Amino acid sequence: MKILILTVWVVGAGITGAALYGIAYEVERMESELAALEMEIRNERAAAHGLEAEWAYLARPARIEELSQRYLPRMRSLSASQIGTAGDIPYQPLPDVLDVLNPEDLATPASTRIIQ
Amino acid sequence: MSERWHADRIAGASGLRRRRGRAFGPYMPPRLDEDVRKALETGRARMLVAGLFMMLAFAMVGGRLTQFAILGESDQHSPVAHRTADKPLKPRADIVDRNGEVLATDLPTASLYANARRLLDPQEAALGLVTVLPDLDYDKTLKKLRSGRTFVWLRRNLTPREQLEVTALGIPGIDFIPEYSRVYPHGPLLSHLLGYVDSDNTGIAGLEKRFDGTLDGADAALRLTIDLRVQHIMREELRSAMLEFKAKAAAGVVLDTSNGEVVALVSLPDFDPNHPGKARDAARFNRATLGVYELGSTFKVFTAAMALDSGVANMSGRYDARRPLKVAQFTIRDYHAKRRWLSLPEVFIYSSNIGAALIAQDIGGKRQQDYLRRLGMLDPLPLEIPETGRPIVPSPWRAVNTMTIGFGHGLAVSPLHLASGVAAVANGGIVHEPTLIRAPRGVTGTAGQRVFSESTSLQLRKLMRLTVLNGTGRNAEVPGYPVGGKTGTAEKPGRKGYVGKSLLSSFVAVFPITQPRYVVLAMLDEPQGDESTNGNATGGWVAAPVVRKVIGRMAPMLGIAPTMADAPELRKLQLDITSEGRELASY
């Protein structure tokens, strides 16, 4: 009886110890993984930050203006006469479906006609 | 087992002598009762104590082992604790414009230092460094390397390439410290607003100085009210006008009339905040907020508003502008002299100094001061940069001061003061403190204080519209975007009173005049007229075109719908002054 109890204790202690070590090493591994990930995030953030600064430098209005003058000479700045409201567009009634004499015209898309 | 053996065992070492004695003497039966039992108990107690002690020691060793296995070596060296205790160098927060465009940011760099005691050959090290970093001075570097100090800066903020090249030299005793360096991607575009930092990234001018504490280590960027695009437009147009008219300096402001937000603020000449050391003093000076000037006729906006608001004049009031006005030792003349009686709108649109002086006289000094104070014209602006100018106010405020201030002389304010005051006149009569910091979403700014009535504001909008249609401000009209405004041409006070030829020409516009959203101000310091302006260098000729171009470019960008020339809301602003019997268009 005494030996049985002792065996149970010893085995129990052994299992607990092994599990404890297992968990401890697992935690250590995860921690180093976390540290690596956080390091990576920090580096990525720093890189993104640098790229943002570079973007701000490349997209500065003075440079965009110069580039547009060089490569888009026909693009002009917008004038008030080019801006209108939806109401300025003349109203064009859609053709009434019932008025269409040949329904096939309506059903055939333009593209198929070109192919034929 | 004999009792004797027992006695011998228990008596132990102490019984040596007795045993010897007993060997020679006759046999004596041991006295078990008292002595032996006592000794037995002592032994047991000692064994118990020793056992307990051993158990405790083993328990401690075991516990410590378990602790090591689970928690690692010690708490201080766990990776989690390490990260929080040894914080990485934190960059200074960004400054962004109202749309989130980056205006100022921190980039990581490396700074080079030397431990002169660990150097093997200072001469060789100095030679190597000079070849890699050509801007280093050989003699100075050598002197630093021979100084024997354990820490001496060699150069701050190296680029990654430079750092790589220095590392490749493999000199012992020199090393890098990671640092952050402030970068302004837009160069001189916002120099006077942002200010700049010193080599330790401490703000020493502009917003960098004012928000030095909050920017350091903050996570969120500082969001300004500035619109980068409008700022660029204003700077470009001012710069080309400055070149065209050979002006010494220029300033420009775009202000939101509804809340006092500064959308653009330009002072020329300017400098590159990336290299503040190279800037001349004239370039560092912020003319839009720190400089105070007698701005001239643009002040007639306030004179007319005060007169109409207080009821000392109405639109049909008439003023004798037939001849120059003599007050004390001053003579007040008209620049665009009409030499006849003028109505209040005519005084305004032809910018009659005589008329404005007479109106100011009617208003009275006390009331004028009161209005100007409420408009903020007599105190430094509460803007969020340290560079704000204190207005130069006449003391004592004599009757002649009242009259000259009526047309903008004798009181020096900053251009931003003027823009802020005109915004209050135009927006329905409510003055807002100008601000550079965009309020977080959901937070509305201060309500502002009413200075003028709604009807006064409407009448002034009519007058400003008329100035652009028929008066001195015709060069400011933008097709599709109805503008109202007022010219200002001030003679600069020289050493011997006012010098006729050095002018301070400005134009302040409100647009869209039908429903004001922005005040646009342009000012040129000592412009020279050319053929295109018939030799004129007045506000209407040199500053009004700047305002026209700025409005023409910024309005479509900011999504302001154009107004047709015959729109009903524009017709409401028409001021009919031909009933006086004179045809306006002939002037």
Image (cartoon, coloured by chain):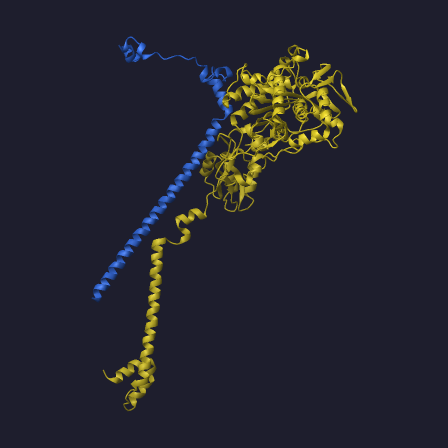
Residue in front for this viewpoint, B182 or B533: B533
- Residue ranking furthest to the bottom: B26
Which of the image's four quarters has the N terminus of chain B?
bottom left
- In the rendering, what colour is chain A? blue
In the displayed structure, would residue B71 be above or below residue B483?
below
- Residue ranking furthest to the right: B329
Which of the image's four quarters has the C terminus of chain B?
top right
User: Taking the image as drawn, is residue B543 in sight?
Assistant: no
Snapshot quadrant of residue B306? top right
Which percent across, then down, holds residue B489?
67, 21
Tell me: A94 left or right of B284: left
- In the rendering, what colour is chain B? yellow
The number of callouts visible is 0
**Residue ID at (45%, 16%):** A87
Snapshot quadrant of residue B253? top right
Tell me: B545 left or right of B110: right
Tell me: B152 left or right of B74: right
Which percent across, then down, holds residue B325?
76, 20
Which percent across, then down, holds residue B533?
63, 14
**Residue ID at (73%, 20%):** B354
Which percent across, then down, holds residue A68?
48, 19
User: Taking the image as drawn, is residue A82 in sight?
Assistant: yes
